[in-house]
Image: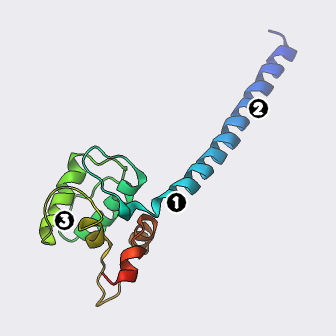
């Protein structure tokens, strides 16, 4: 390969990398926006073992916050409702006197996950943001 051919290949490589970076970045921003837009209704739906969604991430984050004093093993917030998430949901439900069915649903578990200590009015900003993203404001307005 001559010098001109080599420079041509390097140029194509650089252009390819730039396209991947810029197009990939734009796709990520679009995906993030759609995640936030779609998450507002999380609390209106049920999630169980095998579910995979951004709403499960919010639930995992809220479970970690609620159970942080009771458990040293935090959930990985990966959006997959597997055995570990099921175990934490059951622990949470039992600790709150809820029916321990392992389902994060709109009638009992979402409202409990969305609760915070009104006496101190304290909720960490990351948990507050997860709650907002999940749609907890619906319960906050209802006073639960």
Residue 134 vertical placement versus 52 (above, below)? below
What's the residue at 77%, 20% (across, down)?
9
Q: At x 39% / y 71%, what residue is drawn? A: 136
In the image, which disc is placed on residue 50?
A: none
- Which residue bears the numbered disc 3? 92
Which residue is identified by label 2?
A: 15
User: Residue 98 placed where, x, y %?
Assistant: 15, 68
Which of the two marks, 1 or 2, is nearer to us in this view?
Answer: 1
Q: Residues within 10 Å of mark 3 (few under 14, many from 20)?
A: many
Classify mark 2: helix, strand or loop.
helix
Mark nearer the N terminus (1 vs 2)? 2
Mark 1 = which residue? Answer: 36
Please indicate, yes or no, whether residue 68 appears anywhere in the rendered image.
no
**What crowding class fits label 2: few (fewer than 14 Cα within 10 Å), some (14-19), or many (20 or more)?**
few
Q: Give the number of the mark in front: 3 or 2.
A: 3
Res 19 visible: yes
């Amino acid at each position: 390969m001559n010098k001109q051919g080599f420079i041509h290949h390097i140029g194509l490589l650089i252009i390819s990398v730039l396209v991947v970076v810029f197009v990939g970045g734009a796709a990520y921003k679009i995906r993030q926006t759609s995640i936030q837009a779609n998450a507002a209704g999380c609390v209106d739906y049920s999630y169980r073992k095998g579910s995979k969604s951004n709403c499960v991430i919010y639930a995992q984050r809220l479970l970690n916050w609620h159970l942080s004093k009771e458990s040293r093993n935090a959930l990985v917030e990966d959006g997959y409702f597997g055995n570990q998430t099921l175990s934490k949901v059951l622990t949470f439900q039992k600790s709150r006197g809820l029916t321990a069915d392992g389902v994060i649903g709109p009638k009992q578990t979402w409202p409990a996950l969305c609760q915070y200590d009104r006496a101190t009015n304290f909720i960490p900003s990351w948990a507050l943001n997860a709650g907002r993203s999940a749609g907890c404001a619906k319960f906050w307005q209802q006073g639960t």
